[in-house]
Amino acid sequence: MKTCQPSQKPFTTFTTRFNSSLTRTSITWAAMLFVFSTLGLLAGPPFVTDDPEPVDYQHWEFYIASQHAQTSDGWSGTAPHFELNYGVITNVQLHLIAPLAYDAPKNGAAQYGYGDTELGVKFRFLQETSLLPQVGVFPQVEAPTGDSARGLGSGQWQAFLPLWLQKSFGDWTIYGGGGYGINPGAGNQNWGFGGAVVQCQVRDNILVGGEIYHRTAMQTGGRSDTAFNVGTVIDFTEHQHLLFSAGRSLDGLTDFQVYIAWQFTFGPELFHSIASSFRK
């Protein structure tokens, strides 16, 4: 785990295709699903806001995670989703999220199945110094692999193009930034995001933090969202970690949102150990 920050990367779920024939209630539910799913394009577990620090060269992160959001119209989320990050070269990380998504509206049938697949590359191009922050980009795309007719996918390719910064001060770390979301489809519009996280390593194996973020409307005539989360990362061993956060909208649709994950981190020594055991 990295000092004073949780490992990077993230929220992915699904969206409901916007259709002009939907009722007012259905439109609200569809917008909520779209909002929550698009957060998957920018998440840095256990928070929505990400940081610029990639996985170390030849190191891996694997998450078994679940996230859930509640509005006045019901619940949506992943149960679970699987995330994999790999440091392919120094300062560059490859990223994948494969979600099992659900949609459980109050006044409709619940749906469960594979959602939209998230792919990304994180590149840190400026290292942190005593005066300057580290800086990186993390472009991501979401492939429409989920069934949009069942509310388990967007039915469109989506993208998010962010710039992230981070600066540490002893046990404290501040990171955040913003980006631009590309959101094709009838009734949709491109959107902007900005957020910040403050966190502290309160013990050798316990990190706590909080974030606040704002996202502009994603649908024509839709509503923007301002929300917060508080969270923690607990290191049980060098290779196993628990991540958790919870929060809600301050001005938006989400009454409650929660993220929980078990993370495994390992490097090339694991593969060398496995290879050695087979040679014996």
Image (spheres, rainbow, N blue to C red):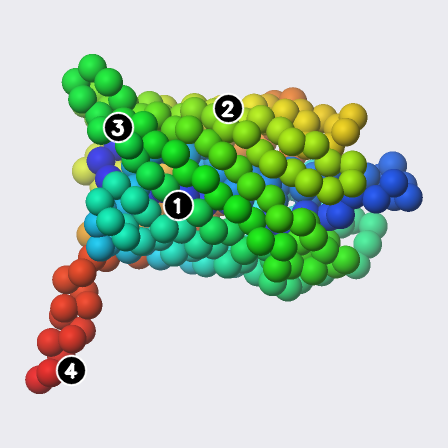
The amino acid type found where label 3 is placed reads Leu
Marked residue nearer the N-terminal end (1 or 2): 1
User: Nearer the viewer's eye, disc 1 or disc 2?
Assistant: 1
- The residue where tag 3 is placed is 126
| Distance CA(mark 1)–CA(mark 3) | 16 Å
The amino acid type found where label 1 is placed reads Val
- Estimate how packed mark 1 is, as few (under 14), some (14 to 19) or many (20 or more) residues with alpha carbons within 10 Å: some
- Estimate how packed mark 3 is, as few (under 14), some (14 to 19) or many (20 or more) residues with alpha carbons within 10 Å: some
Q: Look at 56% across and 49% down and name the residue there.
A: 142
Residue 194's disc is 2
Of the pair 135 and 104, the residue shown nearer to us: 135
Marked residue nearer the N-terminal end (2 or 3): 3
Q: Quadrant of residue 63?
A: bottom left
Q: Quadrant of residue 267?
A: bottom left
Note whether residue 183 is visible: yes
Q: Look at 66% across and 62% down and name the residue there.
A: 112
In screen coordinates, is 60 left or right of 243? left
Q: Position of residue 253 (x, y in %)?
A: 69, 32
- Under circle 2, the secondary element is strand
User: Nearer the viewer's eye, disc 4 or disc 1?
Assistant: 1
- Under circle 1, the secondary element is strand
Marked residue nearer the N-terminal end (4 or 1): 1
Q: Position of residue 215 (x, y in %)?
A: 59, 27
Residue 278's disc is 4
Of the pair 58 and 225, the residue shown nearer to us: 58
Residue 10's disc is none
| Distance CA(mark 2)–CA(mark 3) | 20 Å
- The residue where tag 1 is placed is 121
Q: Position of residue 72 (x, y in %)?
A: 74, 38
